[in-house]
Every structure is written in C-alpha cells, then in structure tokens.
Amino acid sequence: MTDEITRNQPETKSGPGSRAMFVVVLALVLIVGGIYALAQTPAVEEDNNAIVIDGKPVETIILEDIAGKDSDGKAVRYENDEGFVYELVASLPELADGHHFRGFLMQTPNLYVDMGKLEVQSAPVYTLKFVSETDYDDYLRVVVALQPDDVEKPDLRILEGFFEE
C-alpha cells in the first residue's frame, strides 16, 4: 500500500539548482519592475536649490499664518502634461461644524480663482491639488481661508503667501 502511494506522486526537484533559478527569476522581475517605475517617474533635478521637474521649474512658497491660528503651510506651482498645477499642504486648526478650508489664487481682493476645498489627510494636515488649462501666472497671492459651508468667496483668511513675479 505504501509503495502505491509513493509511486503515484509526481517527482519534484528541489535543491541548489532550483533555488538558484528562483533567485535569478526574482532578480529579473525586480530589475524590470524598477526600470518600469523609473520610466513612470518625472525627472526631478536640483540646480542651485531650485527644483526642476521634466525641465520645468517648480516654484515653492511659504504660507504664513495671518489670523493668529498657529497655522503654516507651503504651496508649489509648476507646469506638466496635466496643465498648470498648484499644490498646497498646510497645518490648520480644528474645524467647527459647518465650515471648511478653501484655497484661492488672488490677483486682487475681488479678482480670484477658487482652487477648491482642502482635504484633511491626517489632522491637522490638509492638502489641495488644483490643475488648470489656464495659466494663472499673474495671480501671485495664495490664500487659505476658513469658510462657512454656504459661502463661496474668500472669508476668514488663515494663511497667505506670494509667488515672485
């Protein structure tokens, strides 16, 4: 009976040769995967502390607390295949019910672009990514405002920063 069971099982080879083959295949998969990942990542360069992505400069500014709320943040703007991109990251105070934080690009107090609502990542950190086909290069002021949910224009300004002309 034991001989029958042993005879019906398929032969498997294990040993130094099969382990080496496994290691070679695994290494090839990791190398190909790494090359693919690098091909998908934009080329980021640093030139005299300036950040460049795919040959185009990335402008970075500090967003300063202008409301005494112990807040701070950063904003960047750059151009890529998506269009003109603005990204914000900010440390902001706790929100009261019925309120949210909103980002604005401003040329004057009455001439502004609503970039949208900031999303909480992990309190107190909020982020926003705004992409547009329009170049708002002359909108130098970035504002993060505390907004009641039913107000669309900039309300209580919390953070502010300026891109260079």
Image: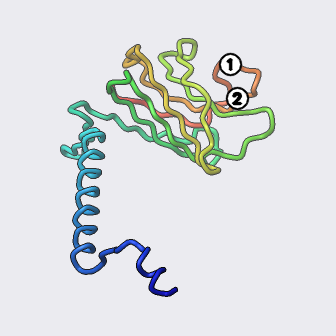
- Secondary structure, mark 2, is strand
Q: Nearer the viewer, residue 81 or 102?
A: 81
* Mark 2 / mark 1, whichever is N-terminal: 2
Label for residue 147? 2
Q: Given the image, on which type of amino acid does mark 1 rest? A: Glu
Looking at the rendering, which quadrant does residue 145 occupy?
Answer: top right
Q: Given the image, on which type of amino acid does mark 2 rest? A: Gln
Q: Is residue 152 above or below residue 46?
A: above
Describe residue 140's horizontal placement relative to residue 19 as left or right.
right
Q: Are marks 2 and 1 in contact (CB under 8 Å)?
A: yes
The CA span between labels 2 and 1 is: 8 Å
Q: Residues within 10 Å of mark 1 (few under 14, many from 20)?
A: few
Q: Is residue 113 above or below residue 11?
A: above
Describe residue 35's horizontal placement relative to residue 3 as left or right.
left
Write the residue at 34% across / 74% down.
12
- In the rendered image, residue 38, in percent from the top left (x then y), is placed at 26, 46
Location of the C terminus (image quadrant): top left
Looking at the rendering, which quadrant does residue 116 occupy?
Answer: top right
Describe residue 19's horizontal placement relative to residue 160 as left or right.
left
- In the rendered image, residue 46, in percent from the top left (x then y), is placed at 22, 45
- In the rendered image, residue 157, in percent from the top left (x then y), is placed at 62, 31
Which residue is labeled 1 in the image? 152
Label for residue 106? none
- In the rendered image, residue 159, in percent from the top left (x then y), is placed at 56, 37
